[in-house]
Image (tube, rainbow, N blue to C red):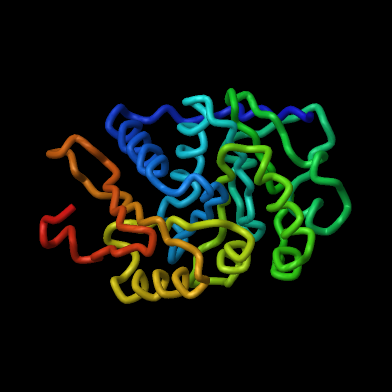
Amino acid sequence: MKSLTLNRLKNYPFDVTESINQLRVNLSFTDKDLKRIVITSSIPNEGKSTITLALWRSLAGIGKKTLLIDCDLRRSQYRTECQMSTEDVFVGTAHVLSGQNDIQDVIYKTNVPNGYMIPVTSLINNPGILLESHRMTELMEQVYDVFDYIIIDTPPLASVADALTVLKNADASILIVRSGLAKKALVKESVEKLKRTGKPLLGMVLNGVDTSARGSYYYKGYGDYYGNYDPDAQKKGKK
């Protein structure tokens, strides 16, 4: 198997790490068959990729064989932000979906123990056809039995339909919401879009809330499988 080094990984403060750990624990309470999880947001800059990467590391850190599939083919930033390097030919998501490479060619073992990744190695303006192809179905089927968790980073819902397309071949989703950025109506619209796929919405993560009084930076807005989430909960003082 190919190797990939992530030369720059953030060290989070204790309260942030604990909140990510709680998110991981919440996942353990869901149906064990829900392994392929799409993570998305309503709009850019809500912290989607940061939380995706942190959750991936947290799952791998407890010994779960975890694969991160980067499906944000339009504007992925992992390659530069994590300063990825490899001695192998650097191919990724687009290469397997276009048929240029086999699945085993694009799965990398990383320097994060138990952490594996299918990266985006070059950006694509219109990846919709690739994400809807039979190769995407084959990819998601083949990784299901190999990994304990498959975490899938996808573009924001308000911009393009990529996340909903990927979710057709996944098991469930999580919605990232940044406090003070996404409007209530837009969050509700995102929830409805995800629910219409027929796949469980495991919940939301409300990001960027200053909850220092409670000793946590991330607020976990987990509802039931279908995302019974109240965007006004922060104003009401509810959890």
Residue 73: image quadrant is bottom right
x then y, percent, for residue 15: 27, 32
Please give the name of the residue rendered at 57% of the width and 50% of the height, measured from the top-left corner: 36
Please give the name of the residue rendered at 35% of the width and 62% of the height, measured from the top-left corner: 227
Residue 25: image quadrant is top left
Q: Nearer the viewer, residue 11 or 97?
A: 97
| Count of picture labels | 0
x then y, percent, for residue 60: 53, 30
Q: Residue furthest right?
A: 100
- Residue 36 is left or right of residue 144, and the answer is left
Please give the name of the residue rendered at 45% of the width and 61% of the height, measured from the top-left corner: 200
Compared to residue 152, the image places residue 54 above or below, namely above
Please give the name of the residue rendered at 56% of the width and 41% of the height, measured from the top-left corner: 149
Image quarter where the N terminus lies is top right
- Residue 138 is left or right of residue 166, and the answer is right
x then y, percent, for residue 238: 14, 56
Compared to residue 8, the image places residue 139 above or below, namely below
Residue 165: image quadrant is bottom right
x then y, percent, for residue 66: 58, 36
Compared to residue 181, the image places residue 49 above or below, namely above
Q: Nearer the viewer, residue 199 or 207?
A: 199
